[in-house]
Amino acid sequence: MIDRADWLDVINPILARLREMPGGLLPILHAIQEEVGYIPPDAVPTIAEALNLSRAEVHGVISFYHDFRSEPAGRHVVHVCRAESCQAVGAEALLAHACDRLGVEVHGTTPDGSVTVEPIYCLGNCALSPAVMVDRNLYGRVTAHQLDTMLESLRGSR
Amino acid sequence: MTRVYVPRDAGAVSVGAEQVARAIATEAMIRGAQVELIRNGSRGLYWLEPFVEVETPAGRVAYGPVKSEDVVDLFQSGFLEGRAHRLFLGKPEDIPYFARQERLTFARVGIIDPVSVEAYEAHAGYRGLRRALEMAPADVVEAVTQSGLRGRGGAAFPTGIKWKTVLNTAADQKYVVCNADEGDSGTFSDRMVMEGDPLVLVEGMTISGIAVGATRGYIYLRSEYPHALRALNEAIAAAYSRGFLGPSVLGSRHAFDLEVRVGAGAYICGEETAMLESLEGKRGMVRFKPPLPAISGLFGKPTVINNVISFASVPIILDRGAEFYRDFGLGRSRGTLPIQLAGNIQRGGLVEKAFGVTLRELLYDYGGGSLSGRPLRTVQVGGPLGAFIPESQFDLPLDYEAFAAKGAMVGHGGIVAFDDTVDMAVLARYAMEFCAIESCGKCTPCRIGSVRGVEVMDRVIAARAARDPAEAAASTALLKDLCDTMLAGSLCALGGMAPFPVLSAIQHFPEDFGLPAAELAAAAG
């Protein structure tokens, strides 16, 4: 966990760099999440003040978008696509399999903090369904067996 | 020096193209072979990815699907000279799937290095912009209108009419915004263009800016597309460094600046007014219309909003003329449509054809039938808000009006195939669930209706399992009523169209809803 002093060191330069950008709140939130791993709720007043917004407005934006997290995720995030194209070739079973293997619910994180499982609604790899994205890496025609191998290596890695 | 092409397209990468590229570079080094590795886009023949091409004196030849384990063997077989191998596919242009297409918008995708301005210009790139710079802005708009181009994002609104509104609205600042929030399942043509020929999008947006008097452009890209983000940023930087973007486009009096903004995982931001809110740094809440974005759009200024494929179709219209483009297609659907074959299909990929091609041709002649080998039962066309179309209607031609007449939509041209193991009640439930997850919450029919829709579908599915046709019929009747409310009362297409997949599933596949025999007979009759 990153403590307050550390994330302030990260957030202040981001705010200094992007606060004048028209419509800059999303780029700011992306940049913070990229660095810190999530948007610390305690950072909301700082962000709001820098952009001359209310805390409610900033909180509203964070909670509206699926990408933004208010608490840390696991070290790796496994996104299993459950949109129609992937459903047509067994995505629901694949997602259930991933949860089963890791012993977590959808959106859950393993107790050791290594992996979070999230559903996602289309990765644009529909000609090679079912698709899975691990962190920023995309996989197509994913079988349960391949997924097991991936999950194993993620659990082993720090 | 032999040129070898390995796609950088996300789909190709998802099945090992990075590993193949690395293996080729390593093996070439070991053997002292002079290889120039070019990372192109995908030709769109995804079942053959990673699709590796070698430039030989007789033209480019392809091998695929190549795995990194095959690379040593390919070198030994002399693939650098285009020799035979079990993965040898011949010339890409001769593969029937590719040969029978009409590639206008996708003319360069899979062929060139996507981020090289030199390669782009060598393949007819930037001719449209050069032509546009010689014309009066109103004439550029007129050419787009005459071409018959309609918005390829799904709504099919005439592009030229939209541009004309922006051109004729006086303002100190105007914007051009590209909607690259390609969230519909079964669609990936925007992604392929952005990864395989991003400069055609840059050129199309620049032409639009010059035509309507806008000096600033934004590409609103979904966050699920990190590979496209990289390619776009590289292409934009290359265009700036060569004077195709900036304060004076190609030395003209026109300025045009362009940047990419990344969304944050909200399907609703593909709705144009929600996208504008998001670009302004707010929640992606749908706006009331009017005012139209063409009059009061981004930051309250006149704004052209088009989809990636719409902008990418503009350069060839300017280069070859409106008539050239209009001569493709039929009725009021002019030009070509990049169609995407997805789901349970053997040969998934990109098929660019003139309007008029039938679903059956696409699914069987191109797609080769289901991946599972079982009979196809239905397809969903146009994303999660599109209707399910039964096998009996597979002779429907891809044409905006023909689809509309059947209560379906062409949308963004994505076709998702399902075999006969599909449970239509589960898909109907999913349509409501998706709407509930992605609703912006502004209007009640969408926000509450979708949640109630999931609950009612749960009752239908439970009644079916309990063999209680009376309860199934009562719940289905309630569901239809709810759909009516959503159709008529929703603010935008999400709540207003989510009933389409639900109602089409009930209409064409009533047997999946546990209904009484009498109702099934009535539906069949």
Image (spheres, helix red, strand yellow):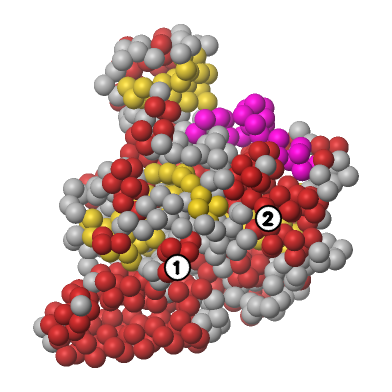
Q: Residue at point 36% right, 89% down?
A: B481
User: What chain does badge 1 belong to?
Assistant: B
Q: Earlier in the sequence, mark 2 or mark 1?
A: 2
Q: Are marks 2 and 1 on the same chain?
A: yes
Q: Position of residue B412 (x, y in %)?
A: 49, 57
State the residue in front, A9 or B166: B166
Q: Position of residue B92 (x, y in %)?
A: 41, 27
Instruction: Say which element carries label 2.
Output: helix
Q: Residue at point 75% right, 70% down?
A: B295
Q: Is residue B198 left or right of residue B423?
A: right
Q: Is residue B2 left or right of residue B119?
A: left
Q: Position of residue B352 (x, y in %)?
A: 47, 44
Residue linked to disc 1? B404
Where does the magenta region start and end?
Answer: B110-133
Residue linked to disc 2? B145
Which three-letter amino acid code belongs to the residue tagged 2?
Thr
- Mark 2 crowdedness (10 Å alpha carbons): few <14, some 14-19, many ≥20: some
Which three-letter amino acid code belongs to the residue tagged 1?
Ala
State the residue in front, B335 or B236: B335
Q: Note whether B497 is above or below B8 in the view shown.
A: below
- Mark 1 crowdedness (10 Å alpha carbons): few <14, some 14-19, many ≥20: few
Q: Residue at point 43% right, 44% down?
A: B350
In terms of image quadrants, where is residue B149?
bottom right
Circles 2, 1 touching at the beta carbon (< 8 Å): no
Taking the magenta stretch, the answer to whether it contains residue B140 is: no
Q: Position of residue A28 (x, y in %)?
A: 66, 61
Instruction: Say which element carries label 1.
Output: helix
Q: Is residue B48 visible?
A: yes
Taking the magenta stretch, the answer to whether it contains residue B126 is: yes
